[in-house]
Image (cartoon, helix red, strand yellow):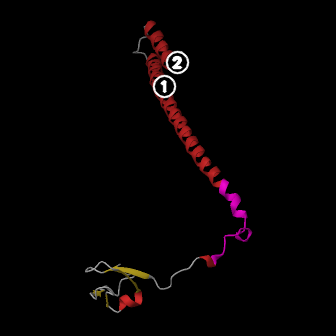
């Protein structure tokens, strides 16, 4: 039997014995029974809220567990690569670094608009502003802003 049911039972007993509520002691008894009923309803509401909060907390815990599992899986993936951090680059032969040639002076290709001949010029040649085509003699002109970090070709 719930608290609300017990309080209703007490009210029913009081009504059943037909107490005269005009007397002070009976008025006190009626007020106590009414108070018990109100308290029983409030306690039932609090229990319902506690159950709802508990359900929400369970759901949050499940979500946090899923997030934790996801993050732990990522950490395990990272652990696979931690073993490689212990090795020194000196342990490996990466080949001769001199195998690569780096152009200190890049070469630019320019196509003559008249004959279609492709010419290769250095940046120094382009800075002069123009060069004649070796095939047809057309003057190839180069224009760019000196503020540009890269050549516009």
Residue 83 image point, x, y percent? 71, 58
User: Measured along the vertical axis of the image, is residue 78 above or below residue 32?
Assistant: below
- Rendered residue at 62%/48% (across/down): 72
Magenta stretch bounds: 80-97
Q: Please tell me how crowded label 1 is: few (under 14), some (14-19), or many (20+) other residues with Cα within 10 Å.
A: some
Identify the secondary structure beneath mark 1.
Answer: helix
Instruction: Please report contact status of discs 2 and 1: CB closer than 8 Å, yes or no.
Output: yes
Horizontally, residue 86 falls left or right of residue 71, namely: right
Residue 48 image point, x, y percent? 48, 28
82 part of magenta stretch = yes
Whether residue 17 is visible to the viewer of this picture, yes or no, is no
Residue 58 image point, x, y percent? 55, 35
Residue underneath mark 2: 2
Horizontally, residue 85 falls left or right of residue 138, namely: right
- Rendered residue at 62%/51% (across/down): 77
- Rendered residue at 47%/85% (across/down): 105
């Amino acid at each position: 039997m719930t608290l609300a049911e017990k309080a209703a039972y007490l009210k029913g007993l009081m009504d059943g014995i037909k107490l005269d509520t005009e007397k002070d002691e009976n008025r006190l008894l009626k007020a106590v029974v009414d108070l018990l009923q109100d308290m029983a309803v409030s306690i039932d509401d609090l229990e319902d809220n506690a159950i709802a909060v508990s359900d929400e907390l369970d759901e949050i815990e499940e979500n946090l567990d899923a997030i934790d599992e996801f993050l732990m899986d990522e950490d395990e993936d990272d652990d696979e690569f931690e073993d490689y951090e212990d090795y020194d680059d000196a342990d490996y032969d990466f080949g001769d670094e001199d195998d690569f040639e780096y152009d200190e002076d890049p070469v630019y290709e320019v196509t003559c608009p008249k004959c279609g001949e492709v010419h290769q010029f250095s940046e120094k040649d382009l800075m002069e502003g123009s060069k004649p085509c070796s095939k047809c003699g057309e003057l190839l002109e180069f224009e760019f802003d000196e503020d540009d970090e890269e050549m516009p070709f």
